[in-house]
Amino acid sequence: MPAEKNQFNSEGFDLSAAAEAGGGVVYEIGGGVTLPTSNDGDDQLKEKADESSPTDESERLKALGNDQFKKGNHLDAYDYYTDAIVACPSGDGIGPTGEELLKLRDEFEEQNREKMMERQRKEMEKRRSRHNSNGDNKMGEDEEEEGVEEDDQALPKFSSPRHFYGPKLAVYHANRAATLLHLGRYGECIEDCDVSILLNPTYVKAYLRRSTAHERTDNTEEALADAKRAYELDPSNGAARKNVQRLQKIENERMEKLKEETMGKLKDLGNSLLGNFGLSLDNFNAVQDPKTGGYSISFNQNSNKK
């Protein structure tokens, strides 16, 4: 008797499930269908890992710069940080470059200077007008009051355009500023810190590095201001606190010295004028009232006599 051929009979199988599963379906005896195990979660993770960020290249270059900085190779670190800045996307829909930011800020400040000069010009005109006026012109008084109200308004401050990758770009500029400090290029360091702070106004490291650059160029006033701002942003920052204390002492000493120099020049000027009358400032004694802080002046005619 001839052997019967085994033929597949689809009767009893869940063909709809098999069709949805595609390849890898196992048809079980009895009509069941075993579907392949789904790896959708793993696939999504793989896809996510494969996705590249527009700042990946900048981050890679920053890491190389960090390695060189730790080794003390500041010029090489500078080059890597510069490449990271260049590689970071900027432009329409993203934000301006650091150079463009500084240009926008400088143009804005120039406009403010022009407004201030215009205010000063108007103020001089008002003083001349008051001097020549008899005070009976009611219209002139109204115009003057309106002008004073306008002039009392504070000049606007520069507001930096938003950059989509601002926080990261701020780090690249601040890191390059750190290399510039070590290279003694303090002016460029300050500019990089300016860009970093415009991109991220709460970036403490940028304030501290700019403070150091200001101090090394003998600008203790600005150095102290930056140190104070860093400390305000992060009161737990020990370096910021110590810098504020140290710089405050230096600034107080500088102001005291400046006051003494100014008083000396004023005294020389006063003596040169009073000398025409046979007098000097030694003829006048200034005594401060400890309660009010005011001064009383007394004249001693015999102080020049020997």
Image: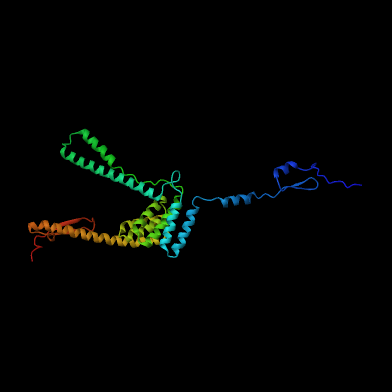
Estimate the x, y position of residue 256 in percent, counting from the top left: 25, 60
> Does 258 sit left or right of 93 as displayed?
left
Q: Residue furthest front?
A: 2
Q: Residue at x 33, y 60 (%)?
A: 215
Q: Quadrant of residue 193?
A: bottom left
Estimate the x, y position of residue 250 in percent, counting from the top left: 30, 62
Estimate the x, y position of residue 304 in percent, counting from the top left: 9, 63
Task: Out of 212 and 263, give the one closest to the viewer.
Answer: 212
> Does 116 sit left or right of 34 as displayed?
left
Q: How many marks?
A: 0
Task: Out of 88 and 37, give the one closest to the viewer.
Answer: 88
Q: Is residue 238 visible?
A: no
Estimate the x, y position of residue 146 in percent, counting from the top left: 26, 37
Q: Residue at x 8, y 57 (%)?
A: 276
> Does 10 sit left or right of 285 as displayed?
right
Task: Out of 213 and 88, give the one closest to the viewer.
Answer: 88
Q: Residue at x 43, y 61 (%)?
A: 76
Q: Quadrant of residue 122?
A: top left
Q: Is residue 191 visible?
A: yes
Query: What kind of colouring is applied to the model shown?
Result: rainbow
Q: Residue furthest bottom?
A: 306
Q: Residue at x 42, y 58 (%)?
A: 79
> Does 125 sit left or right of 158 as displayed?
left
Q: Quadrant of residue 254?
A: bottom left
Task: Out of 138 and 288, give the one closest to the viewer.
Answer: 138
Q: Quadrant of the C terminus?
A: bottom left
